[in-house]
């Protein structure tokens, strides 16, 4: 009898799950089949009795469809968060490349940037330093550390970044001319 329930569940939820997974997968940056499989695993993890009761006997098919949509969206959110955290092999965060020359150039760029940030006026060095922090602070945490309101953080950040752009543009040589010269 349980095998009959499982095939009924598969026949009822399969097309809806495929459609929902196909709709959510591009935004999550995953394959629709992977998303679909994650939802089936989620259903099976609830146990044979629990999954049958929670979905098959939950009442109307509308309840089953709602559960399925929530599960697909939840798995899509999980996939998006996972993609943001994962770093491919061979790429180290904060390192421009595996080549020693690239590491030296990247270090020089960071040194120039930190030097320019230190010369910014007012509270800008503190603010930009907090934004560049490897701790990846939120606006609320930065505002708390600097003792300023969270609402004024955006405009101050904008002014500081504008000032930093002007400073760096003045220090960097003009790019070479392209095309035909006269």
Image (tube, grey):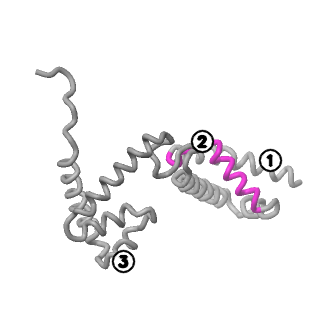
Q: Residue at x 35, y 49 (%)?
A: 108
Residue 16 seen in this snapshot:
no
Q: Residue at x 28, y 58 (%)?
A: 115
**Local secondary structure at mark 3:** helix
Residue 144 has which mark? 3
Q: Nearer the viewer, residue 99 or 11?
A: 99
Q: Is residue 20 above or below residue 151?
A: above
**Local secondary structure at mark 1:** helix
Query: What residue does disc 2 label?
Result: 31
**Earlier residue among tags 1 and 3:** 1
Q: Which residues are magenta?
A: 27-46
40 drawn magenta? yes
Local crowd size for mark 2, using a 10 Å CA cut-off: few (<14), some (14–19), many (≥20)? few
Q: Quadrant of residue 15?
A: top right
Q: Residue 110 in the image: state x and y as whole percent.
A: 36, 53
**Earlier residue among tags 2 and 3:** 2
Q: Residue 88 in the image: state x and y as whole percent.
A: 56, 45
Q: How many angstroms separate mark 1 from mark 2 (CA)?
A: 24 Å
Q: Nearer the viewer, residue 180 or 65?
A: 180
Q: How many angstroms separate mark 2 from mark 3 (CA)?
A: 41 Å
Q: Nearer the viewer, residue 104 or 68?
A: 104
Query: What residue does disc 1 label?
Result: 7
Q: Main secondary structure of the magenta part?
A: helix
Residues marked 2 and 3 touching at CB (< 8 Å)? no
């Amino acid at each position: 009898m349980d095998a009959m329930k499982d095939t009924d569940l598969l026949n009822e939820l399969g097309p809806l799950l495929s459609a929902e997974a196909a709709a959510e997968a591009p935004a999550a940056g995953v394959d629709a089949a992977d998303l679909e499989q994650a939802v089936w695993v989620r259903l099976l993890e609830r146990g044979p009795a629990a999954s049958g009761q929670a979905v098959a006997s939950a009442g109307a098919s509308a309840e089953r469809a709602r559960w399925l949509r929530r599960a697909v969206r939840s798995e899509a959110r999980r996939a998006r968060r996972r993609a943001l955290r994962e770093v491919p092999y061979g790429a180290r965060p904060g390192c421009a490349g595996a080549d020693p020359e690239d590491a030296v150039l990247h270090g020089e760029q960071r040194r120039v940037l930190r030097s320019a940030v230190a010369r910014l006026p007012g509270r800008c060095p503190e603010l930009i330093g907090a934004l560049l922090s490897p701790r990846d602070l939120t606006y609320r945490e930065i505002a708390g550390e600097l003792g300023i309101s969270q609402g004024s953080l955006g405009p101050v950040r904008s002014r500081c970044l504008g000032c930093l752009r002007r400073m760096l543009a003045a220090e960097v040589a003009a790019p070479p001319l392209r095309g035909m010269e006269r």
